[in-house]
Amino acid sequence: MAAEVTDYCSKHTNGIPSSMQHVWQWTVKSFKDADKMSSPLQGAWMIFLAEDRRAKRILEIGSYTGYSALAWYEGTKRTKADIILLELSPKMIAATRRTLDTYNLNDRVTLIEGPAQESIATLTGTFEIIFVDANKDGYLGYVKAILDQNLLAPNGVIVCDNVFARGMTISTSANPELDNSVRPYWTECGKALQKFNEYVVNDPRVDVTMLPVFDGISMIKWKWDASNTGKSVDGLGEGSANGNCSGVHANGATNGEYGRSERSCGQKVTAFCCET
């Protein structure tokens, strides 16, 4: 069922540009852990999100091979957004730089090397989209710092990927088909994400919606509080903006129960199947 849903969604979604197709295919051929990369369907969603929100600045924590950076770039051609990437792994830094150089993205994309927590501390200004897709035990610290430093724009959104950790966040028995070679890793990710999910849903500064799509997506925004600013940004409520695991990308399809989904690269991945 999951594979059928993925195929149906893909057939009824505007596809990704050839540049993203080439990066996706190159990553699949070049990296054994290519399942960490976002799927073509998620890439299309990211372009849609960036276009819809008219983002002018985007922050990505965990760049992997630069596939998602290319999605943000494609989605902000009209706004000419500045895009900042944070990455620690030398291997992923090299892969990301290859993508940036090959597709001439350096005019608007900046890659900052080093530990994300330290890099976040150096950032100023605000971002309309902040994509968190790095080491899962770092999510809590990254998002807390983002909020404490007011890096999220008043009308911005933080998108946290892989919050299900292949189902291990929900229960260690949620995904019996998860390969035993990676089960310990995802189990530990699940433990870290349980703490993160509890933290963010109880943070009084923000509202969060967790969606059963891809490998779980949480979307976080400032909580609307008319007593704070009461302003409107581009027609949107401004909200209260005055409060005080290496990138692992999602795969497969959406909602419901875990099933097996066939990727075009021949790999089988676990995904939530869309409810109808």
Image (tube, rainbow, N blue to C red):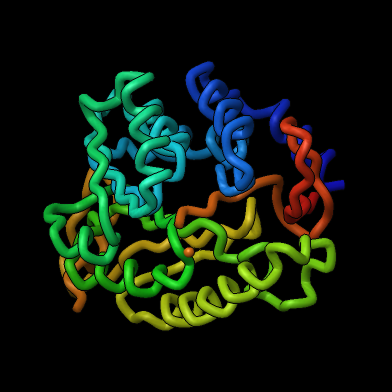
Q: Position of residue 99 (x, y in %)?
A: 39, 28
256 with respect to 194 (left or right): right
The residue at the far right in this view is 1
The number of discs equals 0
Residue 275 vertical position relative to residue 95 in the rendered view, above or below: below
Q: Quadrant of residue 237?
A: bottom left
Q: Is residue 270 left or right of residue 72?
A: right
- Residue drawn at x 38%, y 28% is 98
Residue 198 higher or lower than 54, as above or below: below
Q: Position of residue 231 (x, y in %)?
A: 18, 57
Is 149 or 209 nearer to us in this picture? 149
Give x and y (percent) for residue 147. Answer: 26, 69
Q: Name the foreground residue: 88 vs 163.
A: 88
Q: Quadrant of residue 252?
A: top right
Q: Residue furthest top?
A: 18
Q: Is residue 223 visible?
A: no
Residue at 63%, 68% (x, y): give it: 186
Q: Vertical placement of 114 versus 150: above or below?
A: above
